[in-house]
């Protein structure tokens, strides 16, 4: 490029980012809107949108005198607009997106009048996850900093078609105390919906006895799946006190994910019991190797 060409005004050089493949934005809603709408590239493969909220959800404007007592309801005006930005991105790069990262930060004090509080994270609309499930090329989905409803609740309708085209290899859902997660029995549906998964992260609703499949030590289970999952990142609020049920939990996981290499735990999310469950899964894997050695 000559000296004169390098001094050419930017405005006259034509559109930029025509071949952009990765776009990560962490900022205000206005910034996210402007950039998503202005990127001309049609070959974007990876997008990360992290909303930074500088203000709490606002109180609704007073239109008439309140006729009840109690705290006013806060209105979240940013989430619907953020969801619209995601919808535009998914439509624009529907045939090229392979990696999607969705996040949220609160850039304000998590306390009221000096009293610390646990932040209540706004809920990501169900429609966002439904759209992602229908994107044909996506291999990775990471959601953090949001509350989401039971993921399987709205992925179940796609059970008949998802395994046919689903390329998801990494599905990481948020793990926080205010996220409901999935039921333990839902791990089987995860295996069936997403046959190519290598890494899965989600809260578990609970480890109640009623949600743990029964197993008979003298018989093979009837739901064995040879899934290739390698990393299971989980957590739940409280441990199951029944040692027999803990064995059933480990056996169910091994029956679904025989190639599991790691169970990742999270502070304050029953990490000690999940570490123990992982040791039981490894014991089952070792027993299978021992049995295979007998047959040689």
Image: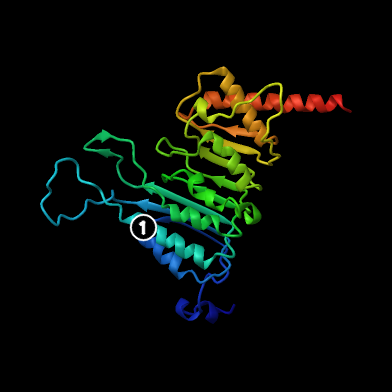
Q: Which residue has dot 1 on it?
A: 80
Q: Determine whether 208 is above or below 7 in the image.
A: above
Estimate the x, y position of residue 160 in percent, counting from the top left: 60, 52
Q: Determine whether 29 is above or below 180 in the image.
A: below
Along the horizontal axis of the image, is 10 left or right of 170? Answer: left
Q: Quadrant of residue 288?
A: top right
The extreme left residue here reads: 65
Along the horizontal axis of the image, is 47 left or right of 67? Answer: right
- Comparing 42 with 150, the one in front is 150
Say which quadrant the N terminus sits in: bottom right
Estimate the x, y position of residue 152 in percent, counting from the top left: 51, 45
Estimate the x, y position of residue 120 in percent, counting from the top left: 34, 41
Say which quadrant the C terminus sits in: top right
Q: Residue at x 23, y 47 (%)?
A: 73
- Crowding at dot 1, Cα within 10 Å, few <14 / some 14-19 / many 20+, comes out as few
Q: Residue at x 62, y 48 (%)?
A: 194
């Amino acid at each position: 490029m000559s000296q004169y060409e390098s001094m050419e005004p930017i405005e006259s050089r034509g559109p930029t980012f025509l071949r952009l493949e990765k776009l990560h934005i962490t900022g205000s809603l206005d910034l996210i809107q402007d950039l998503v709408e202005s990127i001309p590239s049609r070959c974007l493969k990876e997008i990360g949108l992290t909303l930074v909220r500088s203000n709490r959800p606002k109180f609704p404007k007073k239109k008439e005198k309140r006729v009840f007592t109690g705290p006013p309801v806060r209105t979240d005006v940013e989430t619907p607009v953020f969801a619209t930005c995601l919808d535009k991105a998914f439509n624009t790069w529907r045939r090229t997106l392979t990696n999607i990262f969705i996040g949220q930060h609160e850039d304000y004090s998590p306390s009221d009048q000096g009293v610390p509080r646990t932040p209540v994270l706004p809920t990501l609309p169900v429609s966002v996850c439904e759209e992602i499930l229908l994107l044909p090329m996506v291999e990775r989905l990471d959601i953090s900093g949001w509350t989401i409803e039971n993921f399987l609740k709205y992925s179940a309708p796609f059970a008949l078609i998802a395994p046919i085209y689903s390329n998801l290899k990494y599905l990481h859902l948020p793990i926080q105390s205010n996220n409901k997660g999935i039921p333990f029995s839902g791990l089987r549906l995860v295996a069936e919906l997403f046959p190519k998964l290598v890494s899965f992260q989600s809260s578990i609703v609970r480890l109640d006895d009623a949600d743990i499949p029964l197993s008979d030590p003298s018989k093979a289970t009837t739901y064995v799946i040879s899934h290739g999952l390698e990393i299971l990142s989980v957590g739940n609020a409280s441990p199951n006190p029944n040692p027999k049920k803990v064995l059933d939990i480990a056996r169910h996981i091994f029956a679904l994910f025989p190639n599991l290499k790691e169970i990742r735990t999270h502070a304050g999310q029953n990490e000690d019991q999940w570490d123990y469950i992982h040791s039981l899964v490894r014991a089952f894997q070792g027993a299978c190797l021992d049995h295979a050695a007998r047959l040689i």
